[in-house]
Image (tube, rainbow, N blue to C red):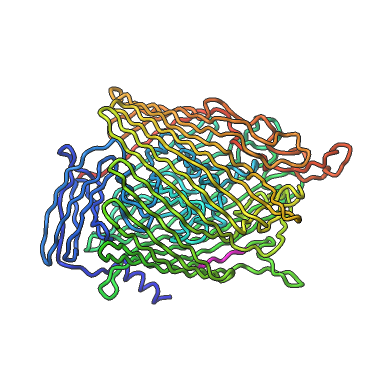
Amino acid sequence: MRKIVNIIVCLHLSYFSLASKIEGIVLSNNKPVEFAHVFLKGTSIGGTTNTNGYYEINDVEKGTYLIVVSAMDYYVDSLRITIVENEKKTFNFTLRESVKNINEVTITATMKEISVSDSPIAIDIITPKLFERNPNPNIFESLNMVNGVRPQLQCNVCNTGDIHINGMEGPYSMVMIDGMPIVSALGTVYGLMGIPNSIIQRVKIQKGPSSTLYGSEAVGGLINVITKSPEKAPFVSFDIFGTSYQELNTDVSIKYKIGKNITALSSVNYFHFDKKWDINNDNFTDVTLQKRSAFFNKFSYKHKSGKSSQLAIRYYYEDRWGGELQWNKSFRGGDSIYGESIYTNRYEVIGVSPFKLFKQDFKLQYSYNKHLQNSAYGKTPFYANQNIIFGQITKNINLNRNDILIGIALRYTNYDDNTVITQSKDSVPSNKPLNTYLPGLFIQDEIGLNENNILLLGIRYDYNSIHGSIFSPRVNWKYTINKNNTLRVGIGNGYRVVNLFSEDHAAFNGARDVVIVSDLKPEQSWNSTLNYSVFKQFKKSFVSIDANLFYTYFTNKIVADYFTDHQKVIFDNLNGFGINRGIGAHLLWSFQFPLKLSIGATFVDVFLQKMDSLNNYNKTVQVQTPKFTSNFVVSYNFNKWKTSVDLTGNIYSSMLLPILPNDYRPEYSPWFCLMNLQMTKEFKKDWQLYMGCKNILNFIPKEAPIMRAFDPFDKYANDPVSNPNGYTFDPGYNYAPFQKARLFLGVRFKIKEIKK
């Protein structure tokens, strides 16, 4: 163990240097541009400007490079340069302000830093500025502002949820923090609500398969939460808001130095909601009560080369419960008063460091997370312990027009709970924790065919210690028609290994028994995407349109059957195939006067074709998946009064709901709209006061969200007189939050730097 620690410390604290150096100043309107990213395209070498706009890049080997400068809200600039040994060169840049920023943010969709406009894969970049237009305490609730992304609540008692991308359910979406698979498997159920917006620098969303680079769970899409860099973060920031529902959210962070080369950022988030609401008088809480704390520390060590090693540590604790109003902790796990109580503890470590081996540049990434869950769903206990260790080494190789990325990865998962998932199949069942080893090797080649065409080829090989060998290839092509029009085409293969708790949490809430028909095989899928983007600058406005077509074909699809037996959830691989197809489009229209419009819409068609005993296919529609979704943001700034007004909202079409046999509730939900209004007033020294109203249309579902709320333990369900239809307690009938219109008020401020 000591040797391993020494290796990691050496990788963080040592780095060989060369003599050549690049430096300069980045300005805009004769003012310094701070936190601009300056890098050499096709390499991992770069730097960031300080508060004076100054940057430096050390240890540059001789050669010809394209130096690229990018910053939020500015057009990208670049310059072809030639470097020889043992020299220092100065290159200054002047950036032009932009009404858009979608092309100016560097990304890692292909595990390399390039601008969005150069990427052969379509990527959505979301900044905290968007989330501030409708403040929420965590990333889960904020992602409904992104087109094609829909947070979906799954249980009306404990308010679990997952994130759907282009109609695909939560287990198909990989959520990463700083490029590491931190939020996965068990963590997807409650872990998403433990990521506060305060630690986020930006969010990168890729719709479509990413299994070639990231392996299992990246079938439907990828959400990469990039946490704030200590160098770029303000010295102090504070944000607190409360609602008329008596919710309170507080975020505080501070930046500080440790010695000469280490910059640190510490952040604390606290969310408190302890008010019982029961609008429909069913004696059950409408919203789960929550007390949540999250602590985040990130350290950045700057090498002489200008590169940085980073280490982040995060701890998250949550105490949540929902159920009958008279419930308290003395009833936990009992069968007299129904409640769902969940204690969650999560520990996370994330690190990245460059290192040299045989005079070659490599990058090491590693992470560890531990998720402890102590739950009681009525009288059904659920205890789980999950440990995930991940390590990855990557190497970039540039050969003429080929930009090659090679990587090796190892992921170890230890999972244990008290359900049938970890029971042995011996004659005498016993507990048998799951230990899964997943070594992988991947390679991709980004080929610059010419100035207008980029071809990306990639393949990944994984060996799952349970399921064996798995291959995941992909091909992407980007065609730049002209500077304003771009076409992207992608074809890829994905796979996914089952984790039942995150597949369908409702199976463990005590209302149904879990039945696993056979050994579940990994899902396989083929996906194709077509993306077309248009950027057009007019005299008094700018328009950006991004449209995409997508199609996915599934085999061995893992299906949770709720309809064969309403007292069971039956898991099995589908004897047939599944289809996910659709179209999405997003319009961004920014005017010279202070008005911005953002409108997105997505249409999906998700269904299964199941083969029966007569070899006939029967089509079934995916539950809780609206065919049409739309989101919008309308923002107007009153510059004279330093005040802005934001109108945000979502529109959902009807969706199939998980009803019971002979259910009196509608099989499909109605169309509905959730709309929010906010006004923000800016004061001096970066102070902001914001207020508004969520759900201003006051929409709540009319139907009873919980079946037989008066008999949650089904003590009288078998009475043919009082219950002739055989209804049972079921809290899974859900399509919208059960929260009426509510006011909110908040204040935020930040101090960028302490003047010496």
- Displayed quadrant of residue 415: bottom right
Is 131 left or right of 281, judged from the image as shown?
left
Prevailing secondary structure class for the magenta stretch in the rendered image: strand
Q: Is residue 98 above or below residue 335?
A: above
**Number of marks in picture:** 0
Confirm whether the magenta stretch covers residue 295: no
Is 724 left or right of 738, judged from the image as shown?
right
Residue occupying image coordinates x 39% and y 43%: 532
Q: Is residue 348 above or below residue 320?
A: below
| Residue 686 seen | yes
Residue occupying image coordinates x 42% and y 32%: 633
Q: Is residue 607 above or below residue 494?
A: above
| Residue 317 seen | no
Position of the N terminus, as image quadrant, is: bottom left
Q: Which residues are magenta?
A: 412-416
- Front residue of 473/158: it is 473
Is 130 left or right of 173, judged from the image as shown?
left
- Displayed quadrant of residue 371: bottom right
- Displayed quadrant of residue 594: top left
Residue 29 image offset from top left, x and y in percent: 17, 37
Is 43 left or right of 720, judged from the image as shown?
left
Residue 378 image offset from top left, x and y in percent: 71, 48
Residue 259 image offset from top left, x and y in percent: 26, 59
Residue occupying the far right of the picture: 721
- Front residue of 679/283: it is 679
Q: Is residue 682 above or below residue 442?
A: above
Residue 675 image offset from top left, x and y in percent: 50, 29
